[in-house]
Amino acid sequence: MLEQIEGSQAVARTVGLCRPAVIAAYPISPQTHIVEKLSDLVRTRELEPCEYLMVESEFGALSACIGASAAGARTYTATSSQGLLFMAEALFNASGLGLPLVMTVANRAIGAPINIWNDHSDAMSMRDSGWVQLYAESNQEAVDLHVQAYRLAESLSLPVMVCMDGFVLTHAVEQVDLPGQDEVDRYLPAFVPQQMLDPDDPVTIGAMVGPEAFTEVKYLMHAKQMQALDEIPRLAAEFAEQFGRSSGGLLSAYRLDDADTVVVALGSMLGTLEDVVDSLRDEGVSVGVLGVKCFRPWPRDEIREALSHARRVVVVEKAFAVGAGGIVGQNLRLALQDLPVEVYDVVAGLGGRAVTRASLRRLLDVLLAGGLDPYELHFLDLDTALVQRELERSRHRVRPGPHAENMLRDLGVVGSGPL
Protein backbone atom coordinates (compact mmCIF):
# COMPACT_ATOMS: atom_id res chain seq x y z
CA MET A 1 0.00 0.00 0.00
CA LEU A 2 1.42 3.39 -1.01
CA GLU A 3 1.75 5.77 1.91
CA GLN A 4 3.45 9.10 2.57
CA ILE A 5 5.50 8.20 5.64
CA GLU A 6 8.72 8.90 7.52
CA GLY A 7 11.46 6.37 6.86
CA SER A 8 11.77 5.34 10.51
CA GLN A 9 8.03 4.75 10.79
CA ALA A 10 8.02 2.70 7.60
CA VAL A 11 10.87 0.51 8.83
CA ALA A 12 9.26 0.03 12.24
CA ARG A 13 5.95 -1.04 10.74
CA THR A 14 7.70 -3.42 8.36
CA VAL A 15 9.74 -4.96 11.17
CA GLY A 16 6.45 -5.48 12.99
CA LEU A 17 5.09 -7.34 9.96
CA CYS A 18 8.07 -9.71 10.27
CA ARG A 19 6.61 -10.84 13.61
CA PRO A 20 9.59 -10.57 15.99
CA ALA A 21 8.91 -12.24 19.32
CA VAL A 22 11.46 -10.13 21.24
CA ILE A 23 12.57 -6.54 20.68
CA ALA A 24 15.28 -5.03 22.86
CA ALA A 25 16.45 -1.50 22.22
CA TYR A 26 18.07 1.58 23.71
CA PRO A 27 17.29 4.93 22.05
CA ILE A 28 19.98 6.94 20.28
CA SER A 29 19.50 9.51 17.51
CA PRO A 30 18.74 9.05 14.65
CA GLN A 31 17.46 5.54 15.38
CA THR A 32 14.98 6.55 18.10
CA HIS A 33 11.83 6.92 16.00
CA ILE A 34 12.14 3.29 14.87
CA VAL A 35 12.12 1.76 18.33
CA GLU A 36 9.55 4.28 19.63
CA LYS A 37 7.11 3.19 16.93
CA LEU A 38 7.78 -0.47 17.64
CA SER A 39 7.10 0.10 21.35
CA ASP A 40 3.75 1.64 20.38
CA LEU A 41 2.90 -1.36 18.21
CA VAL A 42 3.62 -3.69 21.15
CA ARG A 43 1.77 -1.47 23.64
CA THR A 44 -1.36 -1.32 21.48
CA ARG A 45 -1.11 -5.06 20.72
CA GLU A 46 -0.88 -4.45 17.00
CA LEU A 47 2.29 -6.53 17.32
CA GLU A 48 1.72 -9.60 19.43
CA PRO A 49 2.89 -11.85 20.83
CA CYS A 50 6.03 -9.77 21.33
CA GLU A 51 8.05 -8.83 24.39
CA TYR A 52 9.57 -5.33 24.28
CA LEU A 53 12.57 -5.05 26.61
CA MET A 54 13.62 -1.61 27.84
CA VAL A 55 17.28 -2.12 28.66
CA GLU A 56 19.98 0.02 30.26
CA SER A 57 22.31 0.35 27.27
CA GLU A 58 23.02 -0.69 23.70
CA PHE A 59 25.23 -3.46 25.02
CA GLY A 60 22.29 -4.67 27.09
CA ALA A 61 20.00 -4.50 24.06
CA LEU A 62 22.11 -6.77 21.89
CA SER A 63 22.93 -9.06 24.83
CA ALA A 64 19.21 -9.53 25.46
CA CYS A 65 18.67 -10.28 21.78
CA ILE A 66 21.46 -12.85 21.87
CA GLY A 67 19.79 -14.63 24.78
CA ALA A 68 16.35 -14.49 23.18
CA SER A 69 17.65 -15.74 19.84
CA ALA A 70 19.55 -18.57 21.51
CA ALA A 71 16.28 -19.57 23.16
CA GLY A 72 14.57 -19.78 19.76
CA ALA A 73 12.86 -16.38 19.38
CA ARG A 74 12.88 -14.13 16.30
CA THR A 75 14.49 -10.93 17.58
CA TYR A 76 15.21 -7.34 16.56
CA THR A 77 17.18 -4.31 17.69
CA ALA A 78 18.44 -1.03 16.27
CA THR A 79 21.21 1.43 17.03
CA SER A 80 23.51 4.17 15.69
CA SER A 81 27.03 5.56 16.05
CA GLN A 82 28.50 5.20 19.56
CA GLY A 83 25.65 2.84 20.36
CA LEU A 84 26.97 0.39 17.78
CA LEU A 85 30.46 0.72 19.23
CA PHE A 86 29.06 0.04 22.71
CA MET A 87 27.70 -3.22 21.27
CA ALA A 88 31.10 -4.25 19.85
CA GLU A 89 31.77 -7.17 22.19
CA ALA A 90 28.24 -8.50 21.73
CA LEU A 91 28.43 -8.07 17.94
CA PHE A 92 31.26 -10.57 17.76
CA ASN A 93 29.44 -12.89 20.16
CA ALA A 94 26.30 -12.89 18.00
CA SER A 95 28.16 -13.75 14.82
CA GLY A 96 30.43 -16.26 16.53
CA LEU A 97 27.38 -18.06 17.89
CA GLY A 98 25.70 -18.06 14.48
CA LEU A 99 22.51 -16.37 15.69
CA PRO A 100 20.01 -15.06 13.09
CA LEU A 101 19.56 -11.55 14.50
CA VAL A 102 18.41 -8.55 12.46
CA MET A 103 19.48 -5.03 13.43
CA THR A 104 18.90 -1.64 11.85
CA VAL A 105 21.87 0.73 11.91
CA ALA A 106 20.76 4.32 11.33
CA ASN A 107 24.18 5.43 10.13
CA ARG A 108 25.69 8.32 12.04
CA ALA A 109 29.17 9.77 12.53
CA ILE A 110 31.42 8.65 15.38
CA GLY A 111 32.97 11.27 17.68
CA ALA A 112 34.99 12.96 18.94
CA PRO A 113 34.12 15.70 18.26
CA ILE A 114 30.44 15.02 18.93
CA ASN A 115 28.37 14.84 15.76
CA ILE A 116 24.89 13.37 15.40
CA TRP A 117 24.63 13.59 11.60
CA ASN A 118 25.09 11.00 8.91
CA ASP A 119 28.09 9.21 7.57
CA HIS A 120 29.08 5.53 7.45
CA SER A 121 31.88 5.48 10.03
CA ASP A 122 29.81 3.52 12.55
CA ALA A 123 28.96 0.49 10.40
CA MET A 124 32.34 0.57 8.66
CA SER A 125 34.11 0.35 12.02
CA MET A 126 32.31 -2.98 12.60
CA ARG A 127 32.76 -4.31 9.06
CA ASP A 128 34.81 -7.30 10.25
CA SER A 129 32.53 -8.31 13.12
CA GLY A 130 30.99 -11.19 11.16
CA TRP A 131 27.65 -9.51 10.41
CA VAL A 132 26.21 -9.24 6.93
CA GLN A 133 25.98 -5.55 6.01
CA LEU A 134 23.26 -4.40 3.60
CA TYR A 135 23.00 -0.72 2.55
CA ALA A 136 19.72 0.94 1.52
CA GLU A 137 19.59 3.60 -1.19
CA SER A 138 16.05 4.76 -0.34
CA ASN A 139 13.36 4.31 2.29
CA GLN A 140 11.58 1.91 -0.05
CA GLU A 141 14.70 -0.21 -0.22
CA ALA A 142 15.16 0.02 3.56
CA VAL A 143 11.67 -1.42 4.01
CA ASP A 144 12.29 -4.20 1.49
CA LEU A 145 15.72 -5.07 2.87
CA HIS A 146 14.37 -5.74 6.36
CA VAL A 147 11.99 -8.40 5.04
CA GLN A 148 14.81 -9.96 3.04
CA ALA A 149 17.20 -9.68 5.99
CA TYR A 150 15.07 -12.00 8.12
CA ARG A 151 14.92 -14.58 5.34
CA LEU A 152 18.69 -14.38 4.89
CA ALA A 153 19.52 -14.47 8.60
CA GLU A 154 17.29 -17.46 9.26
CA SER A 155 18.20 -19.43 6.16
CA LEU A 156 21.92 -19.34 7.01
CA SER A 157 21.71 -18.70 10.78
CA LEU A 158 23.84 -15.57 10.82
CA PRO A 159 23.24 -11.96 11.92
CA VAL A 160 22.35 -9.20 9.45
CA MET A 161 22.49 -5.43 9.83
CA VAL A 162 20.47 -3.20 7.52
CA CYS A 163 22.20 0.17 7.18
CA MET A 164 20.16 3.27 6.30
CA ASP A 165 21.50 6.81 6.30
CA GLY A 166 20.59 8.65 9.49
CA PHE A 167 18.30 11.68 9.03
CA VAL A 168 18.79 11.56 5.23
CA LEU A 169 16.52 8.50 5.18
CA THR A 170 15.32 7.89 8.74
CA HIS A 171 13.67 11.31 9.06
CA ALA A 172 12.69 11.84 5.41
CA VAL A 173 8.99 11.67 4.59
CA GLU A 174 8.33 10.18 1.18
CA GLN A 175 6.05 7.76 -0.62
CA VAL A 176 6.70 4.15 0.36
CA ASP A 177 4.90 1.00 -0.73
CA LEU A 178 4.37 -0.80 2.56
CA PRO A 179 3.76 -4.54 2.28
CA GLY A 180 0.70 -6.22 3.71
CA GLN A 181 0.87 -8.80 6.48
CA ASP A 182 -0.21 -11.59 4.14
CA GLU A 183 2.54 -10.65 1.64
CA VAL A 184 5.23 -10.74 4.31
CA ASP A 185 3.91 -14.02 5.71
CA ARG A 186 4.11 -15.63 2.27
CA TYR A 187 7.71 -14.50 1.79
CA LEU A 188 8.91 -14.98 5.37
CA PRO A 189 7.92 -18.31 6.95
CA ALA A 190 7.62 -18.84 10.69
CA PHE A 191 10.99 -18.94 12.43
CA VAL A 192 12.47 -22.40 12.90
CA PRO A 193 15.84 -22.01 14.68
CA GLN A 194 18.77 -24.14 13.59
CA GLN A 195 20.02 -24.19 17.18
CA MET A 196 18.36 -23.31 20.47
CA LEU A 197 18.61 -23.73 24.21
CA ASP A 198 16.10 -26.28 25.47
CA PRO A 199 15.95 -27.40 29.13
CA ASP A 200 14.67 -30.79 27.98
CA ASP A 201 17.65 -31.26 25.65
CA PRO A 202 20.49 -29.25 27.23
CA VAL A 203 23.41 -28.05 25.12
CA THR A 204 26.12 -25.45 25.57
CA ILE A 205 26.21 -22.46 23.22
CA GLY A 206 29.37 -20.36 23.26
CA ALA A 207 31.64 -22.79 25.07
CA MET A 208 35.38 -22.26 25.42
CA VAL A 209 37.23 -23.32 22.27
CA GLY A 210 41.00 -23.75 22.36
CA PRO A 211 43.64 -23.73 19.63
CA GLU A 212 42.66 -27.21 18.50
CA ALA A 213 39.41 -25.97 16.87
CA PHE A 214 39.27 -22.14 16.97
CA THR A 215 40.65 -21.71 13.45
CA GLU A 216 38.06 -24.13 12.09
CA VAL A 217 35.23 -22.26 13.86
CA LYS A 218 36.38 -18.98 12.30
CA TYR A 219 36.74 -20.63 8.90
CA LEU A 220 33.13 -21.82 9.07
CA MET A 221 31.99 -18.27 9.90
CA HIS A 222 33.74 -17.09 6.75
CA ALA A 223 32.30 -19.95 4.70
CA LYS A 224 28.77 -19.06 5.82
CA GLN A 225 29.32 -15.44 4.74
CA MET A 226 30.46 -16.70 1.35
CA GLN A 227 27.23 -18.70 1.10
CA ALA A 228 25.37 -15.43 1.57
CA LEU A 229 26.81 -14.21 -1.76
CA ASP A 230 24.62 -16.82 -3.46
CA GLU A 231 21.67 -16.49 -1.11
CA ILE A 232 21.29 -12.69 -1.25
CA PRO A 233 20.61 -12.45 -5.03
CA ARG A 234 18.35 -15.51 -4.88
CA LEU A 235 16.24 -13.97 -2.13
CA ALA A 236 16.19 -10.60 -3.92
CA ALA A 237 14.94 -12.26 -7.11
CA GLU A 238 12.23 -14.10 -5.17
CA PHE A 239 11.26 -10.83 -3.49
CA ALA A 240 11.01 -9.05 -6.86
CA GLU A 241 8.81 -11.81 -8.25
CA GLN A 242 6.43 -11.73 -5.30
CA PHE A 243 6.32 -7.99 -4.54
CA GLY A 244 6.70 -6.66 -8.07
CA ARG A 245 9.73 -4.44 -7.46
CA SER A 246 13.50 -4.94 -7.34
CA SER A 247 15.35 -4.18 -4.11
CA GLY A 248 18.60 -5.31 -2.59
CA GLY A 249 20.84 -7.89 -4.15
CA LEU A 250 24.59 -7.50 -4.18
CA LEU A 251 25.01 -4.58 -6.57
CA SER A 252 22.99 -2.11 -8.64
CA ALA A 253 24.14 -0.86 -12.03
CA TYR A 254 23.12 2.45 -13.60
CA ARG A 255 24.10 3.23 -17.21
CA LEU A 256 27.08 0.96 -16.76
CA ASP A 257 27.23 -1.11 -19.95
CA ASP A 258 29.40 1.25 -22.04
CA ALA A 259 30.81 3.43 -19.25
CA ASP A 260 34.52 4.28 -19.39
CA THR A 261 34.25 6.04 -16.01
CA VAL A 262 32.31 4.50 -13.13
CA VAL A 263 31.44 5.99 -9.74
CA VAL A 264 31.06 3.48 -6.90
CA ALA A 265 29.09 4.37 -3.77
CA LEU A 266 26.79 3.08 -1.01
CA GLY A 267 23.53 4.34 0.46
CA SER A 268 21.41 7.38 -0.28
CA MET A 269 24.16 9.12 -2.26
CA LEU A 270 23.38 6.85 -5.21
CA GLY A 271 20.29 8.76 -6.27
CA THR A 272 22.21 12.04 -6.46
CA LEU A 273 24.97 10.35 -8.43
CA GLU A 274 22.48 9.00 -10.94
CA ASP A 275 21.21 12.54 -11.57
CA VAL A 276 24.78 13.74 -12.20
CA VAL A 277 25.44 10.84 -14.55
CA ASP A 278 22.30 11.68 -16.52
CA SER A 279 23.52 15.23 -17.06
CA LEU A 280 26.95 14.05 -18.17
CA ARG A 281 25.41 11.47 -20.52
CA ASP A 282 23.41 14.29 -22.12
CA GLU A 283 26.77 15.90 -22.90
CA GLY A 284 28.12 12.71 -24.45
CA VAL A 285 30.30 11.63 -21.51
CA SER A 286 30.43 7.85 -21.00
CA VAL A 287 29.96 7.51 -17.23
CA GLY A 288 27.95 5.17 -14.99
CA VAL A 289 27.23 4.30 -11.36
CA LEU A 290 27.75 1.04 -9.47
CA GLY A 291 25.90 0.82 -6.17
CA VAL A 292 27.21 -1.55 -3.52
CA LYS A 293 24.14 -2.96 -1.76
CA CYS A 294 26.02 -5.68 0.15
CA PHE A 295 29.34 -4.60 1.66
CA ARG A 296 29.80 -7.69 3.83
CA PRO A 297 30.29 -10.26 2.53
CA TRP A 298 32.30 -8.42 -0.11
CA PRO A 299 31.02 -9.38 -3.62
CA ARG A 300 34.51 -9.44 -5.15
CA ASP A 301 33.78 -11.49 -8.27
CA GLU A 302 30.58 -9.64 -9.09
CA ILE A 303 32.33 -6.27 -8.74
CA ARG A 304 35.22 -7.43 -10.89
CA GLU A 305 32.83 -8.48 -13.63
CA ALA A 306 30.78 -5.27 -13.42
CA LEU A 307 33.86 -3.05 -13.71
CA SER A 308 35.98 -5.14 -16.06
CA HIS A 309 35.43 -2.76 -19.00
CA ALA A 310 35.95 0.51 -17.09
CA ARG A 311 39.07 2.62 -17.60
CA ARG A 312 38.75 4.56 -14.35
CA VAL A 313 36.74 4.06 -11.17
CA VAL A 314 36.16 6.70 -8.51
CA VAL A 315 34.92 5.49 -5.12
CA VAL A 316 32.92 8.08 -3.20
CA GLU A 317 32.41 6.92 0.38
CA LYS A 318 31.20 8.33 3.67
CA ALA A 319 33.98 6.92 5.84
CA PHE A 320 37.70 6.25 5.69
CA ALA A 321 40.45 4.47 7.58
CA VAL A 322 42.45 7.19 9.36
CA GLY A 323 46.09 6.81 8.49
CA ALA A 324 45.39 4.41 5.63
CA GLY A 325 42.79 5.72 3.16
CA GLY A 326 39.50 4.66 1.65
CA ILE A 327 37.78 1.58 3.06
CA VAL A 328 35.56 0.68 0.13
CA GLY A 329 38.40 1.75 -2.17
CA GLN A 330 40.81 -0.72 -0.59
CA ASN A 331 38.31 -3.53 -1.02
CA LEU A 332 37.69 -2.46 -4.61
CA ARG A 333 41.38 -2.63 -5.47
CA LEU A 334 41.43 -6.23 -4.27
CA ALA A 335 38.59 -7.03 -6.65
CA LEU A 336 40.25 -5.27 -9.58
CA GLN A 337 43.84 -6.37 -9.11
CA ASP A 338 45.63 -7.13 -12.40
CA LEU A 339 43.00 -5.22 -14.41
CA PRO A 340 44.07 -2.01 -16.20
CA VAL A 341 41.74 0.19 -14.14
CA GLU A 342 42.72 3.31 -12.20
CA VAL A 343 40.96 3.62 -8.83
CA TYR A 344 40.47 6.98 -7.09
CA ASP A 345 39.42 7.35 -3.43
CA VAL A 346 37.17 10.28 -2.49
CA VAL A 347 35.74 10.82 1.00
CA ALA A 348 32.47 12.75 1.10
CA GLY A 349 29.62 13.63 3.41
CA LEU A 350 31.44 13.22 6.72
CA GLY A 351 29.41 14.31 9.73
CA GLY A 352 26.40 15.12 7.59
CA ARG A 353 28.06 17.49 5.10
CA ALA A 354 25.77 17.66 2.08
CA VAL A 355 26.83 15.69 -0.99
CA THR A 356 25.29 17.82 -3.72
CA ARG A 357 24.91 17.40 -7.45
CA ALA A 358 27.13 20.45 -7.95
CA SER A 359 29.93 19.00 -5.78
CA LEU A 360 29.81 15.63 -7.51
CA ARG A 361 29.76 17.27 -10.93
CA ARG A 362 32.86 19.33 -10.05
CA LEU A 363 34.57 16.15 -8.82
CA LEU A 364 33.86 14.29 -12.05
CA ASP A 365 34.91 17.27 -14.17
CA VAL A 366 38.28 17.32 -12.38
CA LEU A 367 38.61 13.54 -12.72
CA LEU A 368 37.82 13.56 -16.45
CA ALA A 369 40.33 16.39 -16.95
CA GLY A 370 43.06 14.26 -15.34
CA GLY A 371 43.22 16.36 -12.17
CA LEU A 372 42.94 13.58 -9.57
CA ASP A 373 45.89 11.55 -8.31
CA PRO A 374 45.02 7.83 -7.93
CA TYR A 375 47.65 7.53 -5.19
CA GLU A 376 46.14 10.24 -2.96
CA LEU A 377 43.09 10.29 -0.68
CA HIS A 378 40.76 13.10 -1.74
CA PHE A 379 38.12 14.88 0.37
CA LEU A 380 35.08 16.34 -1.38
CA ASP A 381 34.52 20.05 -0.56
CA LEU A 382 37.41 20.14 1.92
CA ASP A 383 37.98 23.68 3.26
CA THR A 384 41.74 23.69 2.67
CA ALA A 385 42.17 27.27 3.91
CA LEU A 386 40.59 26.35 7.26
CA VAL A 387 42.84 23.30 7.57
CA GLN A 388 45.96 25.25 6.66
CA ARG A 389 45.23 27.91 9.30
CA GLU A 390 45.00 25.22 11.96
CA LEU A 391 48.17 23.50 10.77
CA GLU A 392 49.99 26.82 10.86
CA ARG A 393 48.63 27.49 14.34
CA SER A 394 49.92 24.09 15.46
CA ARG A 395 53.40 24.83 14.13
CA HIS A 396 53.76 28.00 16.18
CA ARG A 397 52.26 26.91 19.48
CA VAL A 398 53.44 24.31 21.93
CA ARG A 399 49.83 23.68 22.98
CA PRO A 400 47.55 24.84 20.18
CA GLY A 401 44.37 23.52 21.80
CA PRO A 402 41.66 21.28 20.35
CA HIS A 403 41.60 21.45 16.56
CA ALA A 404 37.82 21.31 16.41
CA GLU A 405 37.31 24.26 18.77
CA ASN A 406 39.96 26.33 17.00
CA MET A 407 38.44 25.77 13.57
CA LEU A 408 34.92 26.51 14.82
CA ARG A 409 36.22 29.83 16.13
CA ASP A 410 37.75 30.52 12.74
CA LEU A 411 34.35 29.90 11.18
CA GLY A 412 32.58 32.05 13.76
CA VAL A 413 30.39 29.17 14.85
CA VAL A 414 31.18 29.39 18.58
CA GLY A 415 32.21 32.25 20.79
CA SER A 416 35.86 32.43 21.72
CA GLY A 417 38.39 34.46 23.59
CA PRO A 418 41.73 35.58 22.18
CA LEU A 419 43.79 32.79 20.61
Image (tube, rainbow, N blue to C red):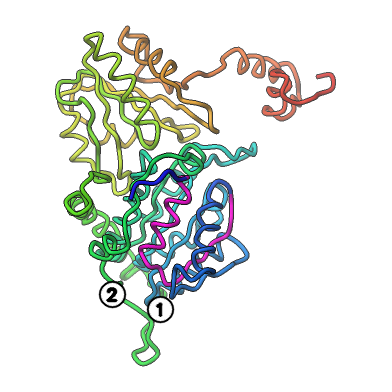
Q: Earlier in the sequence, mark 1 or mark 2?
A: 1
Q: Secondary structure at mark 1?
A: loop
Specify few, some or many for label 1: CA neighbours under 10 Å numbering under 14, 14-19, or 20 or more.
Answer: some
Q: How far, Cα to Cα, is label 1 from label 2?
A: 11 Å
Q: In the orientation shown, which residue stands out farthest toward the right? A: 417
Residue 146 visible in image: yes
Q: Is 319 rendered above or below residue 149?
A: above
- Residue closest to the eye, 391 or 346: 346
Residue indicated by mark 1: 71
Give the image location of residue 258, x and y in percent. Answer: 15, 21
- Residue closest to the eye, 44 or 172: 44
Q: Secondary structure at mark 2?
A: loop
Asked whether 340 falls inside the magenta stretch, the response is no
Residue type, mark 1 in image: Ala
Residue placed at 52% from the left, 58% from the top? Answer: 37
The region drawn magenta spans 6-28
Res 222 label = none
Q: Nearer the viewer, mark 1 or mark 2?
A: 2
Q: Answer yes or no: do the residues labelled 1 and 2 have beta carbons within 8 Å?
A: no
Residue indicated by mark 2: 192
Q: Is 211 rendered above or below residue 195?
A: above
Give the image location of residue 333, x and y in percent. Answer: 28, 31
Q: In the orientation shown, which residue stands out farthest toward the bottom? A: 200
